[in-house]
Amino acid sequence: MRDISRKVKTLRTATAGATLRVSPATLVAIRENRIPKGNPLEVAKVAAIQAAKNTGQIIPYCHPLPVDFVSVEFHLGEDQIDIQASVKAIYKTGVEMEALTAASVAALTLYDMMKMLDEDMEILGVKLLEKKGGKGDFKDRFLQSLKAAVLVMSDTIAQGKKEDFSGKIIVDRLKESGVDVVDYKIIPDDLSLIQATLRSYADDMQLDLVVTTGGTGLSPRDTTPEAMSGIIEQDVPGITEAARAYGQDRTPYSMLSRGRAGLRGKTLIINLPGSRKGVADSLDAIFPAVLHSFNMMRGGGHPSREALSGSRSSKG
């Protein structure tokens, strides 16, 4: 089973379709409620809902997940029944398998209930029609690459007593997200030096993004949040709130991080913890969604529902 523990929960939706070819006489019998086993559409609907809720028990590599909604619709044509099953869940992984299973079981249930009347019935196919809510839906596209710096604040690393790992993790993640890292620097935990460096990144270099690591805890030398007070002009508290909430589900120490996030001019500055695990968790929590802030600052606004509902096959 694939490890999804690093993923964040989002609203996931999927719609799948199935088609059952039947004789015109069978369709007449359905419409006139003359199927010996009862109303096949009602039974197939219940079966599909149960199948969606129990997909993790049927398909070995599917994760059990909390299904929030299932809908099943039937469209009777001249010689076929089209089935459409939609599933919603707020979870870490997609619900396309739940939708496909629901559509499949609906078709099989119809087949079972009517096979004594129609020996030529055939399930023509089962297909994923749409899915959304995965990571790809929150990845913005930019006409120009974003320029960023990574700033490591640590007395021991600056003195060469320890090696930096957290800053390099940030550099790698930014590059994976398509961000151009133009500077990577290590400085001591000195409030004045931190402020001077952040001012240079924002005012002189006019970078889009600065991600810092270190100095967000409770030790006497942890002064990053205090340094931010004299730098940022607009708070964006939701960024670090999301990182702390994500981290708190994985370690009870996440609540002790005092990191902040905010804007200086058009430069977004984000404080991350100093530990490797804290940095990795924080990056998982806020990327790639945090990059949408740059489209907002450029007047792009939020994507429409239509833009987020484009059909996808199996990614996410």
Image (cartoon, rainbow, N blue to C red):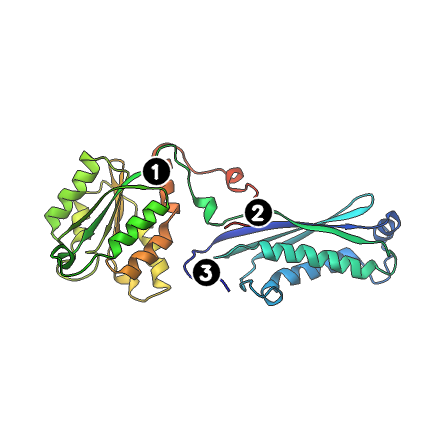
Q: Which is nearer the N-term, disc 1 or disc 3?
A: 3
Which residue does the numbered mark 3 point to in the structure image? 4
**In percent of the image, x 42 and y 40: which residue is there?**
140
What crowding class fits label 3: few (fewer than 14 Cα within 10 Å), some (14-19), or many (20 or more)? Answer: few
What crowding class fits label 1: few (fewer than 14 Cα within 10 Å), some (14-19), or many (20 or more)? Answer: some
What is the secondary structure assignment of the residue under circle 1? helix
What is the secondary structure assignment of the residue under circle 2? loop
How far apart are the two marked residues, 3 and 2, measured between alpha carbons? Answer: 19 Å
Query: Hey, what amino acid is under mark 1?
Result: Phe
Q: Is residue 297 left or right of residue 265?
A: right
What crowding class fits label 2: few (fewer than 14 Cα within 10 Å), some (14-19), or many (20 or more)? Answer: few
Which residue does the numbered mark 2 point to in the structure image? 313
Query: Hey, what amino acid is under mark 3?
Result: Ile
Whether residue 22 is visible here, answered yes or no, is yes
How far apart are the two marked residues, 1 and 3, measured between alpha carbons? Answer: 28 Å
Query: Hey, what amino acid is under mark 2?
Result: Ser
Which residue does the numbered mark 1 point to in the structure image? 294
Q: Is residue 37 left or right of residue 210?
A: right
How far apart are the two marked residues, 2 and 1, measured between alpha carbons? Answer: 28 Å
Give the image location of residue 96, x and y in percent: 58, 53
Of badges 2 and 1, the one in the foreground is: 2
Between 175 and 6, the one lying in front of the other is: 175
Give the image location of residue 125, x and y in percent: 71, 50
